[in-house]
Image (spheres, grey):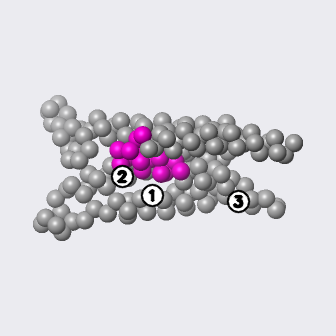
């Protein structure tokens, strides 16, 4: 019985081995958190948890897409895996979420940066899911630097 349970968690992965999938999801979580911490620190509506969820979900979509494409759905050549469709689905879903964050208060538009950072967290998750953690890490570092440094520049220019 224990072997059957163990095989369910190890032998059912056709494309991405379970430890690699776990590492990718952890990386998506960590990088999404890095972006979310900055938003949380600024007390924005979409903070740490939201960015982590978006990034991990995007990562999971990619891994699931890879795994599903390896399943037997018929004769060879009949099934197509289109990575662009996976990316489009994630970006459309996250864009919907991000748009919900943006609102107008009087003459001011608010939370555009938070909406954009959510969209980026989705891209970070896609990168982790596709096994491009280094690329996702580079983007995360750059974005956190941009969000932090440009905030200081904006404050000084307003003084």
Q: Mark 2, residues whose alpha carbon is within 10 Å: few (<14), some, or many (≥20)? A: many
Mark 2–mark 1 CB contact (< 8 Å):
yes
Instruction: Give the numbered dot on residue 135.
Output: none
In the image, 118: left or right of 23? right
Mark 3–mark 2 CB contact (< 8 Å):
no
Q: Which residues are magenta?
A: 120-134
Question: Which residue in the protein does label 1 denote?
Answer: 90
Real-space CA distance between mark 3 and mark 2, rounded to the nearest whole angstrom: 30 Å
In the image, 20: left or right of 6? right
Sooner in the amino-acid sequence: mark 3 or mark 2: 2
Q: Residue furthest right?
A: 159
Residue 49 seen in the current view: no
The quadrant of the rendering that contains the N terminus is: top left
* Image quadrant where residue 39 sits: top right
Dot 3: element: strand
In the image, 61: left or right of 148? left
Q: Nearer the viewer, mark 1 or mark 3?
A: 1
Q: Mark 3, residues whose alpha carbon is within 10 Å: few (<14), some, or many (≥20)? A: few
The answer to whether 145 is drawn above or below residue 2 in the figure is below
Q: Residue at x 20, y 34 (%)?
A: 6
Dot 2: element: helix
Question: Which residue in the protein does label 2 denote?
Answer: 62
Question: Which residue in the protein does label 3 denote?
Answer: 103
Mark 1–mark 3 CB contact (< 8 Å):
no
Sooner in the amino-acid sequence: mark 2 or mark 1: 2
In-front residue for pair 57/131:
131
Sooner in the amino-acid sequence: mark 1 or mark 3: 1
Q: Nearer the viewer, mark 3 or mark 2?
A: 2
* Image quadrant where residue 148 sits: top right
Residue 22: percent from the left, percent from the top?
Answer: 34, 37
Q: Residue at x 18, y 63 (%)?
A: 73
């Amino acid at each position: 019985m224990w072997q059957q349970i163990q095989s369910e968690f190890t032998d059912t992965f056709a494309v991405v081995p379970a430890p690699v999938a776990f590492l990718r999801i952890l990386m998506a979580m960590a990088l999404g958190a890095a972006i979310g911490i900055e938003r949380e620190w600024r007390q924005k509506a979409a903070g740490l948890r939201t960015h982590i969820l978006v990034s991990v979900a995007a990562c999971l979509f990619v891994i699931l897409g890879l795994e599903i494409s390896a399943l037997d759905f018929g004769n060879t050549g009949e099934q197509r895996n289109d990575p662009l469709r996976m990316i489009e689905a994630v970006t459309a879903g996250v864009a919907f979420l991000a748009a919900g964050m943006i609102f107008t208060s009087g003459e001011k538009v608010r939370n555009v940066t938070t909406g954009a950072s959510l969209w980026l967290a989705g891209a970070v998750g896609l990168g982790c899911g596709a096994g491009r953690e280094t690329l996702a890490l580079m983007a995360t570092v750059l974005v956190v630097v941009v969000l932090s440094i440009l905030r200081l520049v904006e404050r000084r220019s307003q003084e």
